[in-house]
Image (cartoon, rainbow, N blue to C red):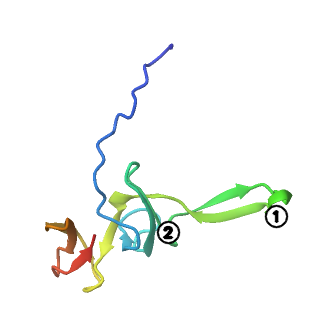
Amino acid sequence: MYGKPRQKNEQTSRIKPHVTKNDTVVVLSGKDRGKQGKVLRVDPARGKAIVERVNFTKKHTRANPQKNQKGGILERESPIELSKLQVICPSCNQPTRTGSHRTAEGATRFCRKCEAELGK
């Protein structure tokens, strides 16, 4: 009511991410630069992904005896920007950019270095 009017979903343009679930990726920048891991989850709306053993943060939890949970400090993976990730080609084992071929069944990704198919 007062103050700035809120805009609903300013960034509604969703770009299809170059990374998909179960891809092996390498981190290009940040505190985990150079680490490799498997993509566990991708959130295209936010432009983030959760990668196995990358970008750990500490979460403080309270004990809950009803659910049989202990309290303490947990370490878990937190989302990382998609722009910081690069796909590792399974055939040439190098970080590479991805391209896409349009076919009758749909678009398929390929490695820009060795032209091998990466799947959907």
Image quadrant of residue 69? Answer: bottom right
Q: Foreground mark, 2 or 1?
A: 1
Q: Is residue 65 above or below residue 115?
A: above
Q: Is residue 90 above or below residue 60?
A: below
| Left or right placement of residue 4 versus residue 78 in this view | left
Q: Residue at 30% across / 83% down in the picture?
A: 90
Instruction: Name the residue beneath numbered marker 2.
Output: 54
Q: Amino acid at mark 1?
A: Asn
Q: Position of residue 25 (x, y in %)?
A: 37, 72
Image quadrant of residue 89? Answer: bottom left
Dot 2, crowdedness within 10 Å: few (<14), some or many (≥20)?
Answer: many
Looking at the image, which residue sits at the far top?
Answer: 2
| Left or right placement of residue 43 versus residue 71 in this view | left
Report, in whole angstroms, how far the alpha carbon at label 2 lies from the one at label 1: 28 Å
Dot 1, crowdedness within 10 Å: few (<14), some or many (≥20)?
Answer: few
Q: Position of residue 76 (x, y in %)?
A: 60, 64
Q: Is residue 12 above or below residue 106?
A: above
Of residues 41 and 75, the one drawn nearer to the viewer in this rendering: 41
Instruction: Name the residue beneath numbered marker 1.
Output: 68
Q: Quadrant of the C terminus?
A: bottom left
Total residue callouts: 2
Q: Amino acid at mark 2?
A: Val
Q: Residue at 73% across / 56% down in the picture?
A: 61
Q: Residue at 84% across / 57% down in the picture?
A: 66
